[in-house]
Image (spheres, rainbow, N blue to C red):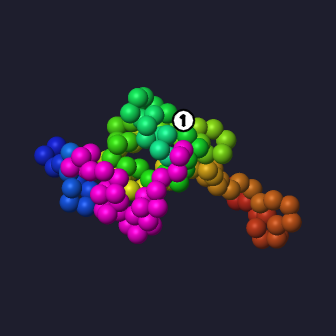
């Protein structure tokens, strides 16, 4: 995006999004996110939103929480199963889940063939 373009989410500017309550914001989400918010947030999710009013950075295990406009500009450390991954929330993350930004698996890097490999796959070129 260039400097002149203002961010919009489903036709709404960031200022309009911050004015909305959760039920109004849920109408802009996909069916899964809308249903999750309309069923009501869990106590831990409500506590996260309350803590974000007081602090700029929090730690959480809630990987399945939807990013809402109230979170934009904050830093949330999301647990990936081993450690907390620091996630800086920006506008383009709206409607996604926190767990999408803290990977739980390493990249696979293959090296030499292992035990029990076939004869042809054991050949490793020198160059």
Q: Residue furthest right?
A: 116
Which residue: 63% across, 38% down?
83
**Residue 30 in the image, given as x and y percentages of width and height:** 38, 67
Q: How many marks?
A: 1
**Residue 7 sits inside the magenta stretch:** no
Left or right, 13 with reference to 38? left
Question: In the image, which residues are magenta?
Answer: 16-44
**Residue 79 in the image, given as x and y percentages of width and height:** 59, 42
Instruction: Name the residue nearer the viewer: 5 or 60.
Output: 60
**Residue 26 sits inside the magenta stretch:** yes
Q: Is residue 124 above or below residue 72?
A: below
Which residue: 34% across, 57% down?
23
Q: In the figure, residue 81 lies in which quadrant?
A: top right
Residue tagged 1: 59
Left or right, 69 with reference to 83? left
Instruction: Name the residue nearer the viewer: 64 or 47.
Output: 47
């Amino acid at each position: 995006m260039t400097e002149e373009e203002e961010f919009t989410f489903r036709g709404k500017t960031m200022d309009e999004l911050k004015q909305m309550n959760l039920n109004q914001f849920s109408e802009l989400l996909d069916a899964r996110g809308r249903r999750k918010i309309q069923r009501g947030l869990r106590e831990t999710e409500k506590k996260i939103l309350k803590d974000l009013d007081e602090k700029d950075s929090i730690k959480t295990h809630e990987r399945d929480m939807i990013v809402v406009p109230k979170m934009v500009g904050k830093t949330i450390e999301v647990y990936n199963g081993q450690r907390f991954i620091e996630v800086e929330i920006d506008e383009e993350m709206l409607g996604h889940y926190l767990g999408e930004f803290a990977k739980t698996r390493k990249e696979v890097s293959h090296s030499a063939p292992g035990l029990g490999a076939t004869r042809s796959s054991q050949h490793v070129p020198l160059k």
